[in-house]
């Protein structure tokens, strides 16, 4: 017989998010392509949503005409696909019940737009707990402490999050993501992040930078794109990215930093607020061997990518520089710095 038409339908209505082409045979016409649509607001409850997205059932009605004079036959088949969409990326709640805004940053994925402040995470049925350290910590073990070494600062500004050693950020992981940091590695390390989320790799941070640099309008009030952000590694530039200048308004560090002061210091940022889709990075500083460093003037974030057993890749921003700092040798793993998480698909 010859298939003369295929009509595809789907169970969930409304806003288009993905075009789905089912597996076809040589006799299946081009009309087998359908745009799958859904709107989470129209779903009844959350029974169709899990950590990887939403599953949609696609039904095909196939009209086939026989080669002879036999009548037309109608066949029905169904397939299930998983859809991902920015509409599913608006917030996340960790194992302790802390709420965080989140946003889709193009191909860089769905990122938390607030710093993590969890002291434990659920990895399957296992609770992974982080002990509290102090501002004189010199350990390479999992520990957390407060920005500016101050519980009152943390209580007043929960959006500042907590500061973690690298072992805390990666808790529960048997090994780090290693190898070429620019090799396209997507992290598989949940670490301290909520279930369904993970600690981003060095590569994933680079992709976030590229998205904001190339397309800043959705994320920042200062909308000038950086024309040089053509590849994720920015032509191999390390340390200050994209360069050492301090005046270029198109450098994406400006578009990543919050507009809000920390400790009375102006951050020089233009990010939209976290609730409005900006990455909204506050300059909450770090803790290093008994000292509070850069509170109000800088900040840093762990990645899941290590250099060796003493150093791991990170990212930092500074109030006086419009770029993003990626130290080619990474940072010492006993330092206590911030964490952002990315949704796992």
Image: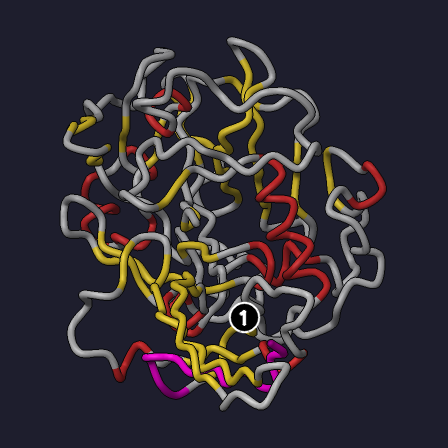
Nearer-the-camera pick, 230 or 220: 230
Q: Main secondary structure of the magenta part?
A: strand
Give 319 or 113, whichever is nearer the viewer.
113
Which coloring applies here? secondary structure
**For numbered disc 1, what is the local secondary structure?**
strand
Q: Quadrant of the N terminus?
A: bottom right
Judged from this view, the residue extending furthest toward the front is 69
Q: Count neighbours of disc 1 (C-alpha within 10 A) and say few if under 14, some if 14 to 19, many if 20 or more.
A: some
Whether 5 is among the magenta residues is yes
Q: Which residues are magenta?
A: 1-14
The answer to whether residue 333 shows anywhere in this view is: yes
* In the depicted structure, whether residue 21 falls above or below residue 179: below
Q: Residue 112: x and y, percent? A: 40, 55
- On screen, residue 125 versus residue 57, left or right, reads left
Q: Is residue 109 above or below residue 88?
A: above
Residue bearing the label numbered 1: 20
Q: Nearer the viewer, residue 221 or 201?
A: 201
**Would residue 120 be seen by someone viewing this image from the given angle?**
no
Image spot of residue 297 (x, y percent): 52, 45
Query: Residue at position x 66%, y 20% from top?
Result: 329
List x then y, in percent, for residue 321. Answer: 68, 49
């Amino acid at each position: 017989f010859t298939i003369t038409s295929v009509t595809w339908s789907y169970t969930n209505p409304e806003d288009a998010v993905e075009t789905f082409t089912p597996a076809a045979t040589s006799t299946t016409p081009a009309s087998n392509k359908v745009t799958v649509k859904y709107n989470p607001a129209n779903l009844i409850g959350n029974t169709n949503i899990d950590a990887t997205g939403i599953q949609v059932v696609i039904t095909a009605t196939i009209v086939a005409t026989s080669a002879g004079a036999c009548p037309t036959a109608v066949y029905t088949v169904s397939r299930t696909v998983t859809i991902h969409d920015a509409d599913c990326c608006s917030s996340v709640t960790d194992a302790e019940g802390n709420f965080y805004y989140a946003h889709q940053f193009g191909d860089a994925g769905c990122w938390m737009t607030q710093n993590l402040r969890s002291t434990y995470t659920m990895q399957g049925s296992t609770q992974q707990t982080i002990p509290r350290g102090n501002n004189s910590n010199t350990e390479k073990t999992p520990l957390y402490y407060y920005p500016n070494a101050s519980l009152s600062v943390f209580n007043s500004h929960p959006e500042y999050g907590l500061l973690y050693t690298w072992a805390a950020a990666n808790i529960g992981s048997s090994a780090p993501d290693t190898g070429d940091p620019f090799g396209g590695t997507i992290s598989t390390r949940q670490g301290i992040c909520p279930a369904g989320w993970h600690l981003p790799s060095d590569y994933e941070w680079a992709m976030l930078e590229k998205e904001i640099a190339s397309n800043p309008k959705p994320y920042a009030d200062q909308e000038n794109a950086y024309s040089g952000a053509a590849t994720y590694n920015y032509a191999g530039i390390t340390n200050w990215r994209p360069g050492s200048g301090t005046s270029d308004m198109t450098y994406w560090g400006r578009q990543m930093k919050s507009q809000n002061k920390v400790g009375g210091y102006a951050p020089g940022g233009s990010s939209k607020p976290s609730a409005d889709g900006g990455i909204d990075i506050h300059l909450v500083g770090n803790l290093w061997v008994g000292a509070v460093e850069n509170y109000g003037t800088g900040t840093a974030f762990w990645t899941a990518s290590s250099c060796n057993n003493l150093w791991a890749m990170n990212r930092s921003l500074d109030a006086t520089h419009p770029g993003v700092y990626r130290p080619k040798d990474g940072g010492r793993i006993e330092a206590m710095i911030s964490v952002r998480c990315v949704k796992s698909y």
